[in-house]
Amino acid sequence: MILSLILNFSKQDLKDKYTGSVLGGLWAFIIPLTNILMFTLIFSKIMGARLGSVGAGFEEYGYSIYLICGIVPWAAFSSTLLRVTTVYRDKAGLIGKVQLSLLILPVYIVLSESFVFFVSMIFFIGFLLLIGFPLDVHWLFIPCVFLIQQILAFSIGLVLAVLSVFVEDIREMMPVLVQFWFWLTPVVYVVTILPSEYMEFMAVNPYYHFAQAYRDIVIGHQTPDFSILLKMLGLSLLIFGFGSFLLKKLERDIRDFV
């Protein structure tokens, strides 16, 4: 019953995003691919020299591959985080009509964004096959990395979703903070352009480890560092536990406020 309801929410969410547009669901692919093209054109010459080789014969596409490895997962992570943060206010009418667990409700956002991610990755795989870039068994680790990433996005979003019901500024502040997080993480630039002391910060930047894991898999053709990813999972579950506790304590107030 609950699973069916969440799946229906996810399906409707994908439809609602593009209702009324001529191209409909194609915008789910046009927008990210347009962004990738823009970043590639702007940064390819600047970053290409700093990137190094991604494999013999693929120098022309090196930065494009590097960029897509970072920006497609980041798009899913940031969108999930931002949308979960505002879910209780966005679905205020639904919360008042349907007695659905507030803990379960935001899951439809994770599923919706995950669908867009995996479709985007299919396009990416098609591009790699087109240029003859080697794919190997390490790609099987991508869903695992993505799962941990989305648990983190959901968990942080859950805490902020509870707080944003009572503090309106959180809703307005989060897009700015996420934009800062984006530029503080080597998603579109190569980390070697930064001073060496900045790497100490990278160690405590959770998304850096996810970006590195995707590039280890795709570009390095190697297993990502699961010791770090397990730490990210532990951090995610800790934040999720705090968010669940906070929600349980404030659920009645949340239903009254929205």
Image (cartoon, grey):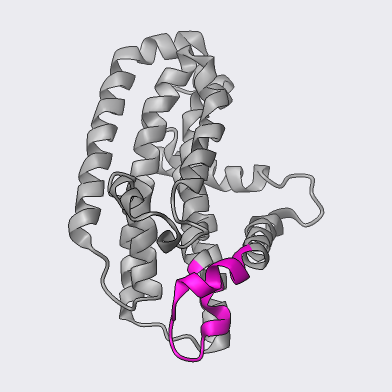
Q: Is residue 82 magenta?
A: no
Any part of residue 100 in sight:
no
Residue 177 x, y percent position in the rendering: 50, 34
Question: Which quarter shows the N terminus?
Answer: top left
Q: Residue at x 44, y 50 (%)?
A: 185
The secondary structure that dominates the magenta segment is helix
Q: Residue at x 37, y 49 (%)?
A: 207
Residue 77 x, y percent position in the rendering: 45, 48
Residue 22 horizontal side relative to residue 197, left or right: right
State the image quarter where residue 144 is shown. bottom left
Q: Is residue 213 above or below residue 131?
A: above
Residue 44 horizontal side relative to residue 57, left or right: right
State the image quarter where residue 139 is shown. bottom left
Q: Is residue 160 above or below residue 189?
A: above
Q: Residue at x 51, y 36 (%)?
A: 82
Residue 248 horizontal side relative to residue 14, left or right: left
Q: Is residue 174 above or below residue 35?
A: above
Residue 225 x, y percent position in the rendering: 23, 63
Task: Give the magenta range.
Answer: 43-66
Q: Nearer the viewer, residue 221 or 258?
A: 221
State the image quarter where residue 223 is shown. bottom left
